[in-house]
């Protein structure tokens, strides 16, 4: 996610929320940021198939001894994973089945390079529940909002705008999960009002064990009242290599299980960073794809028709690179990149964004970001009709 402070955006508090007075502005202690040696093995219970020929090795490293050659289509029972000295994922298997050489079947355990394996994501108990948190009309908020405003004020503003869900920043690669205190107050109030809250994290995918631990901590956080986030969203834009995206999504999915709603924020496919984005790989593990469809990146006028085409094409291209019924939630723009206020999207543009999301079959539309949206943008958001949920 393009974080507003990194874009040097002017901080404009949303007019619907009055700041609350807090005795402390500190956040929860982050997970310790330490890289374990690559020989450390993490438990993982999963099944998978080799998608290409791969060697079974004695250790998670290309320099390790080769134990056998596993042809494409070899079934694996995975009981652990690790990263090598370069940060790439490897899977440990205690047994293999049809496809492997007779000398290997059920006889030799070893390590397989992660990029050569597709893990089975499992079947959710109810598939419609996996995308439910990402449907309707949503808004994004950085963690600072939870420190400036009371949970009651946030929920009241969200209901007044007709929101169905809220993305809240709760973790980052170099800090771990820090959103516990804010979620502890927001989740009970939001759930009582029928508002879903999705835990939003920002992994770098350079230290996979730490990124996985951050995601698990965010997704499974439980408040004293027993409330948990309604889903997990990972903003994957720092390292978009196919292997890193594949391993991160697969391990998170295997760890959290098939019933955890999971979404991934991506570049739009029209951007340079989106043309080579591994959308098909992301779709293997994540329930919904959320492209950052920010259209106002230059100082010039933008027409509603132009915004409509951009958002429509983004959804259409993602579906073409994944599958026709791939769940996509559009992430629209409510910030001024140049801080002057003159480049903020107008009501007609915001309406065009939502219309394109609806017409292209998106399951929902949301906007970035709560504290930078102007009064006019909040009014436009309130007037929007959310896209209908697509089964």
Image: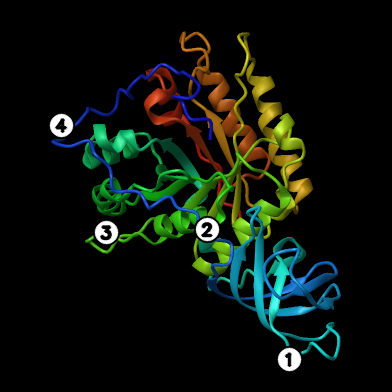
Badge 3 crowding class, 10 Å Cα cut-off, few under 14, some 14 to 19, many 20 or more, is some
At x 39% / y 30%, what residue is drawn? 370
Label 4: element kind: loop
Q: CA distance from mark 2 to mark 3?
A: 24 Å
Counting from the top left corner in percent of width and height, residue 32 is at: 38, 52
Counting from the top left corner in percent of width and height, residue 294 is at: 59, 27
Q: Quadrant of residue 127?
A: bottom right
Q: Earlier in the sequence, mark 1 or mark 3?
A: 1
Q: Camera-side residue: 383 or 33?
A: 33
Q: Earlier in the sequence, mark 4 or mark 3?
A: 4
Badge 2 crowding class, 10 Å Cα cut-off, few under 14, some 14 to 19, many 20 or more, is many
Which disc, if any, is residue 107? 1
CB within 8 Å, label 2 to label 3? no
Q: Earlier in the sequence, mark 1 or mark 2?
A: 1
Label 3: element kind: loop
Q: CA distance from mark 2 to mark 4?
A: 37 Å
In the displayed structure image, the side of residue 168 where residue 46 appears, left or right: right
Counting from the top left corner in percent of width and height, residue 51 is at: 80, 67
Does the rendering let one see residue 29?
A: yes
Above or below, comparing residue 153 to residue 334 in the picture = below
Which disc, if any, is residue 21? 4
- To which residue does mark 3 refer? 223
At x 31% / y 34%, what residue is drawn? 145
CB within 8 Å, label 2 to label 4? no
């Amino acid at each position: 996610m393009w974080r507003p402070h990194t874009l040097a955006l002017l901080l404009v508090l949303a007019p619907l929320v009055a700041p609350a007075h807090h005795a402390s502005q500190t956040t929860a202690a982050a997970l310790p940021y330490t890289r374990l040696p690559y020989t450390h093995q993490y438990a993982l219970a999963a099944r998978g198939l080799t998608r290409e020929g791969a060697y079974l090795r004695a250790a998670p490293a290309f320099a390790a001894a080769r134990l056998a050659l596993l042809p494409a289509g070899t079934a694996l029972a995975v009981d652990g994973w690790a990263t090598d000295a370069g940060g790439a994922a490897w899977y440990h298997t205690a047994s293999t089945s049809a496809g492997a050489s007779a000398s290997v079947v059920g006889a030799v355990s070893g390590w397989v390079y992660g990029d050569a394996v597709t893990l089975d994501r499992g079947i959710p108990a109810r598939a419609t529940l996996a995308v439910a948190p990402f449907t309707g009309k949503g808004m994004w908020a950085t963690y600072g909002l939870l420190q400036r405003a009371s949970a009651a004020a946030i929920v009241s503003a969200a209901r007044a705008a007709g929101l169905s869900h809220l993305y809240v920043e709760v973790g980052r690669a170099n800090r771990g999960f820090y959103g516990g205190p804010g979620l502890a107050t927001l989740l009970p109030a939001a759930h009582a009002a029928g508002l879903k809250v999705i835990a939003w994290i920002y992994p770098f995918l350079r230290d996979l064990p730490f990124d996985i631990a951050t995601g698990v901590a965010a997704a499974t956080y439980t408040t004293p009242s027993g409330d948990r986030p309604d889903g997990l969203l990972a903003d994957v834009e720092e390292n978009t290599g196919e292997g890193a995206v594949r391993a991160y999504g697969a391990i998170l999915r295997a760890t959290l299980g098939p019933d955890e709603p999971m979404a991934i924020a991506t570049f739009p496919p029209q951007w340079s960073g989106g043309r080579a984005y591994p959308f098909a790989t992301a779709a293997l593990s994540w329930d919904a794809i959320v492209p950052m469809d920010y259209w106002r990146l230059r100082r010039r006028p933008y027409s509603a028709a132009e915004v409509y085409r951009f958002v429509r094409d983004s959804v259409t291209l993602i579906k073409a690179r994944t599958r026709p019924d791939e769940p996509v939630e559009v992430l629209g723009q409510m910030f001024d990149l140049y801080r002057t206020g003159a480049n903020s999207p107008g009501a007609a543009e915001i309406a065009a964004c939502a219309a394109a999301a609806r017409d292209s079959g998106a399951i929902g539309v949301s906007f970035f970001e709560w504290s930078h949206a102007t009064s006019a943008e909040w009014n436009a958001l309130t007037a929007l009709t959310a896209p209908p949920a697509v089964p």
